[in-house]
Image (cartoon, coloured by chain):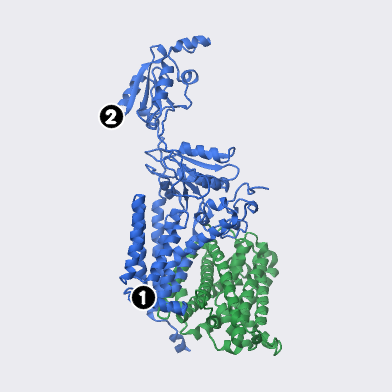
Chain colours: A green, B blue
């Protein structure tokens, strides 16, 4: 169970994909439809995915310059001790915020669709306990867990997608580019944010067996969620129309709820979607918790375990901060904006500085 | 600005909950690590302290006196003194009645020692036959016994005696004793293992003698490269233990690891392979068996061919196989003996059965108590109809029946076969029917419990079935608290545990993950034999090709 156990390329792919797939499946169609307001959001998603891939490649390039080191270690090498420390703290803060958002979103959806009466704190605490149990096992255990969850997600998701063809109407997706390309570009920022998750490459390139394949890993790792998101968006818009989607908080669940297959054991399948979605939330939560603790540990050059525990109450309190679901969405949007700055602009800058300083680092 | 910020400050309960969030797992992990340290504290044994008091002197009177004072009260210890080879050199043989082969002693040992040895020397024209005879001479020229060795210490002597060997003490000679292999074993003939029955396949199982077992392995397994290393375990009762592996397949590191763990065992008496299993496993807190135990010869041989290591212990028919992975628990040798299509289907069925056996009742609870909306309306209505008279929540309802069933199963296990069946009928049919009639439980619930129970019997490994049964109860409690969310949480926890678990350096959950597509040919499906060209990649074998 040593940390030294290195990751294979497809393990890196699975980590990136699992991390990206999270809240997005349920909210992306609405978030994107609000901005785009035409049925072309699938185009925005693809463009957003491409941008994410570009950003991922830059991050990989940066990480490959420092073999065997994570972002937390080489940031100080590039920009000096103090600025590096501040950067690390911001990244750690981002990961904490991200895992808090995941927890809270999970609790909100559960309250709405599965457990009306159960208090949120009980759900969140139980979730965090299961999470810490896994995270203590270190990156190898986390990776194996991701690999278990990934095929389950793929199978159930595409099963549900095929089922929802029953109420799918291609006309809702027409006209393609009816209002030109501008609305599509308008939504790109939102969709690109839903691909945040590739930044985990800042950490895991260091643990890869073959770091030179990291580029491939990040490309495939983002391509898989693109496929998921495009499928979701097409299905949701095709069934519920753009106007319908904008008015719903969780359009994907509504979609699954709105068709029935009597005769098979279940009539409705949103439970299945919720199950895989909770698993995906779990993966995102676990990896962000791990990333934040790893950051603290490496910044202070100490063992990781105490930091895992230290982070738990912080993540919990942050998760309880939003007063309602709208607060949560706002919070999540600002976390996304932070991600844009941190993981698109910053790596370019760092890469530039590293190139300039060249031999010194 | 300030006010909005203040309004976001969480209530004091949130801080309290945050404290609970961290306190519980932290305390648990402390307790775990404390127990772990306690169990890891195995003191190295040192039984090799030389003590001249217990050495053989080479003078018969003194040696015999010492033996008499130390073991004189043993009624079955036989000491026979005689004159060696028709000379005046005194000698004695010692053996324990019953466990040593009397025919061998009378016909071969005593007879050849008491004939005139001086004559024999003359015939060969050498002068070494004059008394006093040395151990060397006796071993080379006189004793017609296959297994002969020398010991110099009294404690070694006694342990050999008690295992059925015969000791030969000489007067006026070197300070050592010849041990003659006269052990007589009472063994059961190798029959069909009763705990793992196959419809098709060899009917041969191990028995309680390690000698027979290694013989079976040699006879049916690979010949040239099968390595069987002998070790002794137990401090008081020294038992023979053998590690078997195939030299040019098994990973050296693995063999070394197994050997080290066995050598670290520090217990006075190892009664069964189960002791070994528990003392060498990686995580004693896990509900899953991390070492496979089997009575079947074919299972051991195929595991050896995959690069695993087998551990045989004297006195038990159960052979341990390490490292164990999760898929082994749901495989049966028969999968390979039948054609691949039935083999595959049966195997998938078993995985499904394992799933039902773990999650069946918890899914029932979560749907009945929490998410009635998710089941088809007609079914929901009919369930509601049958549950009208049931006074308990579904968790209690399921617990009543599940516990009753577990008791029945336990009772049936220990009873003679004919009564066991009666218990099954009385318990299963009568109690189930009566419980429904009495309105304690609903009929659907009885169906769920029955299906679960039968599913758990479909798992070929008995101990794997037990661990799934334990997990079923935990799953039920999760479901009773959180409904479907609880079941998902439990699933995540189970998977987390499985991902963390490692058996002798191999992830327990492999070959499912890490993805080795080649290994998947023998995981959920059983690919046609022609396609299975490689040994499992996870085993890191020296010779990965089964065939070209």
Residue for badge 2: B73
The residue positioned 43% from the left and 74% from the top of the image is B367
Task: Mark yes or no: residue B227 visible.
Answer: no
Front residue of A205 and B134? B134
Mark 2 surroundings: few (<14), some (14-19) or many (≥20) residues within 10 A? few
What is the chain letter for disc 2? B
What is the chain letter for disc 1? B
Residue A316, given in percent of the width and then of the height, sits at 45, 75
Q: Which of marks 2 and 1 precedes in the sequence?
A: 2
Q: Are marks 1 and 2 on the same chain?
A: yes
In the image: residue A71, left or right of residue A296: right
Q: Which mark is residue B387?
A: 1
* SS type, badge 2: loop
Can you say whether B173 is above or below A305 in the image?
Answer: above
Residue B359, given in percent of the width and then of the height, sits at 45, 66
> Looking at this rendering, what residue extends furthest in the left direction?
B73
Front residue of A276 and A86? A276
Residue A324, given in percent of the width and then of the height, sits at 47, 85
Mark 1 surroundings: few (<14), some (14-19) or many (≥20) residues within 10 A? many
In the image: residue B359, left or right of residue A152: left
* SS type, badge 1: loop
Q: In the rendered image, which quarter is residue A192 located in? A: bottom right
Q: CA distance from mark 1 to mark 2?
A: 71 Å
Q: Which quarter of the image is occupied by the C terminus of chain A? A: bottom right
Can you say whether B491 is above or below A189 in the image?
Answer: above
Front residue of A260 and A253? A260
Task: Mark yes or no: residue B209 visible.
Answer: yes
Residue A114, given in percent of the width and then of the height, sits at 45, 78
């Amino acid at each position: 169970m040593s940390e030294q156990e290195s990751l294979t390329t497809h393990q890196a792919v699975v980590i990136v994909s699992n991390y990206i797939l999270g809240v997005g499946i349920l909210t992306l169609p609405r978030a994107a439809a609000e901005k785009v307001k035409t049925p072309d959001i699938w185009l925005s998603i693809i463009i957003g995915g491409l941008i994410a891939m570009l950003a991922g490649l830059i991050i990989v390039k940066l990480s490959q310059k420092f073999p065997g080191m994570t972002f937390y270690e080489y940031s100080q090498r590039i920009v000096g001790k103090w600025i590096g420390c501040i950067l690390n703290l911001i990244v750690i803060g981002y990961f904490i915020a991200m895992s808090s958002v995941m927890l809270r979103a999970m609790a909100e959806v559960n309250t709405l669709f599965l457990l009306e009466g159960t208090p949120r704190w009980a759900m969140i605490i139980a979730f965090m306990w299961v999470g810490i149990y896994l995270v203590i096992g270190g990156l190898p255990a986390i990776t194996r867990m991701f690999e278990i969850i990934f095929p389950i997600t793929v199978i159930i998701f595409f099963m549900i997608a095929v089922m929802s063809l029953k109420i799918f109407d291609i006309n809702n997706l027409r006209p393609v580019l009816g209002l030109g390309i501008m609305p599509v570009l308008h939504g790109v920022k939102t969709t690109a944010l839903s691909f945040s998750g590739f930044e985990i490459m800042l950490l895991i390139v260091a643990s890869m067996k073959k770091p030179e394949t990291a580029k491939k890993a990040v490309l495939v790792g983002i391509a898989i969620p693109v496929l998921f998101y495009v499928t979701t968006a097409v299905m949701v818009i095709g069934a519920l129309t753009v106007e319908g989607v904008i008015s719903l908080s969780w359009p994907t669940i509504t979609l699954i709820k709105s068709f029935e297959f009597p005769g098979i054991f279940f009539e409705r399948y949103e439970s299945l979607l919720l199950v895989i979605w909770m698993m995906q939330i779990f993966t995102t939560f676990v990896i962000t918790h791990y990333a934040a603790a790893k950051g603290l540990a490496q910044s202070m050059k100490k063992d990781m375990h105490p930091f895992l525990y230290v982070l738990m109450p912080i993540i919990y309190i942050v998760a309880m901060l939003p007063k309602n679901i709208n607060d949560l969405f706002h919070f999540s949007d600002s976390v996304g904006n932070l991600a844009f700055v941190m993981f698109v602009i910053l790596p370019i800058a760092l890469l530039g500085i590293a190139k300039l300083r060249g031999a010194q680092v | 600005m300030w006010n909005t910020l203040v309004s976001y400050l969480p209530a004091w309960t949130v801080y309290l909950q945050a404290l609970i969030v961290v306190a519980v797992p932290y305390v648990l992990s402390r307790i775990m690590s404390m127990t772990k340290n306690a169990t890891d504290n195995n003191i190295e044994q040192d039984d090799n302290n030389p003590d001249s008091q217990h050495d053989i002197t080479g003078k018969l009177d003194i040696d015999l006196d010492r033996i008499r004072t130390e073991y004189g009260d043993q009624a079955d210890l036989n000491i026979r003194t005689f004159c060696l080879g028709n000379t005046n050199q005194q000698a004695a043989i010692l053996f324990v009645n019953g466990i040593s082969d009397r025919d061998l002693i009378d016909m071969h040992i005593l007879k050849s020692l008491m004939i005139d040895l001086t004559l024999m020397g003359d015939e060969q024209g050498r002068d070494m036959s004059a008394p006093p005879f040395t151990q060397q001479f006796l071993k080379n020229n006189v004793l017609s016994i296959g297994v002969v060795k020398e010991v110099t210490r009294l404690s070694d002597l006694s342990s050999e005696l008690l295992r059925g060997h015969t000791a030969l003490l000489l007067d006026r000679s070197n300070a050592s004793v010849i041990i003659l292999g006269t052990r007589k074993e009472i063994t059961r003939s190798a029959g069909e293992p009763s705990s793992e029955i196959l419809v098709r396949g060899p009917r041969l199982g191990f028995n309680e003698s390690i000698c027979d077992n290694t013989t079976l392995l040699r006879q049916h397994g690979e010949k040239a490269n099968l390595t069987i290393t002998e070790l002794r375990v137990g401090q008081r009762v020294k038992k023979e233990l053998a590690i078997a592996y195939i030299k040019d397949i098994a990973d050296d590191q693995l063999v070394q690891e197994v050997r080290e763990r066995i050598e670290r065992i520090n217990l006075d008496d190892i009664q069964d392979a189960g002791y070994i299993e528990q003392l060498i496993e990686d995580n004693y807190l896990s509900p899953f068996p991390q070492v496979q135990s089997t009575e079947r010869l074919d299972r051991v041989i195929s595991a050896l061919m995959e690069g695993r290591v087998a551990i045989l212990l004297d006195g038990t028919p159960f052979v341990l196989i390490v490292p164990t992975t999760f898929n082994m628990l749901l495989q049966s040798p028969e999968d390979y003996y039948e054609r691949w299509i039935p083999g595959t289907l049966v195997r998938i069925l078993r995985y499904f059965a394992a799933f039902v056996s773990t999650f069946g009742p918890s899914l029932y609870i979560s749907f009945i108590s929490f998410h009635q909306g998710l089941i088809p309306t007609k079914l929901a209505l009919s369930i509601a109809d049958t549950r009208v008279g049931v006074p308990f929540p579904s968790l209690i309802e399921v617990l009543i029946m599940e516990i009753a069933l577990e008791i029945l199963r336990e009772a049936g296990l220990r009873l003679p076969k004919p009564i066991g069946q009666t218990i099954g009928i009385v318990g299963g049919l009568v109690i189930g029917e009566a419980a429904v009639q009495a309105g304690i439980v609903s009929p659907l619930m009885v169906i769920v419990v029955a299906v679960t129970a039968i599913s758990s019997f479909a798992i070929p490994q008995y101990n794997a079935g037990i661990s799934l049964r334990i997990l079923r109860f935990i799953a039920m409690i999760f479901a009773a608290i959180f409904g479907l969310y609880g079941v998902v949480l439990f699933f995540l926890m189970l998977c987390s545990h499985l991902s963390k678990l490692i058996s002798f350096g191999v992830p327990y959950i492999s070959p499912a993950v890490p993805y080795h597509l080649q290994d998947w040919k023998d995981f959920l499906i059983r690919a046609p034999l022609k396609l299975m060209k490689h040994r499992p990649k996870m085993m890191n074998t020296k010779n990965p090709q089964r065939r070209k």
